[in-house]
Image: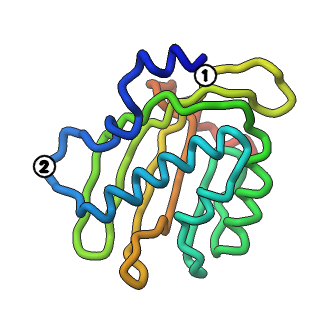
Amino acid sequence: MAGDAQSQPDALEASRHCGGTNVLPPDLVEVIEQDHRALDAIVRGDQGPKKAVFSHRDDVTLANPLGPPARGWDQVEKTLDRSVPQMRDGEPIRFERIVEYADGDLAYILEFERWRGKAGSSDEIVPMALRVTTIFRREDGVWKIALRQADPITTPRAIESVRDQEG
């Protein structure tokens, strides 16, 4: 498993490059890299490093693919506590930056996160991928995640795939 990961571009180095012309502030680049390292912990079942990069304010929002959006630090923390233990024995493969932008105290990135690991009750290591939009906000001089939205859409899909399952 580790040998395959080394044949891929270094995930953290790849996170620094994209097609945009906007230059991200160095302190934001470091927080994005910290967030990427947190994925390494998450896919091993440890949500602690991810919690550290999230804002703890009342308007922080997490919309992950395992449930409805969580708003406010208490709800975001509960969502992480519920969802992260479902992943284990994993490793990040790479981050594919689609776009990045920063202006003042707000910034965003859109990426594909690719990793492999065990999910749920399965003992099989499988590849996984998410399309992730992350909005960062500078809080008291430190960049924090204000919003993270992730879904499994990484390839084209038919319009029928967005049918409301409740309706």
Calculate the distance from the C-alpha at mark 1 to the C-alpha at mark 2: 31 Å
Q: Amino acid at mark 1?
A: Pro
Q: Is residue 55 above or below residue 86?
A: below
The picture quadrant where one finds residue 72 is bottom right
The picture quadrant where one finds residue 106 is bottom left
Q: Residue at x 79, y 54 (%)?
A: 82
Q: Which residue is mark 2?
A: 21
Work out whether residue 156 can be spotted.
Answer: yes
Q: Amino acid at mark 2?
A: Thr
From the top left corner, tell me how far across and down residue 117 is, in percent: 68, 27
Closer-to-camera residue (6/121):
6
| Quarter of the picture holding the N terminus | top right
Q: Is 139 situated left or right of 116 in this image?
A: left
Dot 2 surroundings within 10 Å: few (below 14), some, or many (20 or more)?
A: few
Give SS at disc 1: strand
Q: Which residue is mark 1?
A: 127
Closer-to-camera residue (24/5):
5
Ranked by sequence position, the earlier of labels 1 and 2 is 2
Q: Is residue 104 above or below residue 4?
A: below
Q: Residue at x 36, y 80 (%)?
A: 141
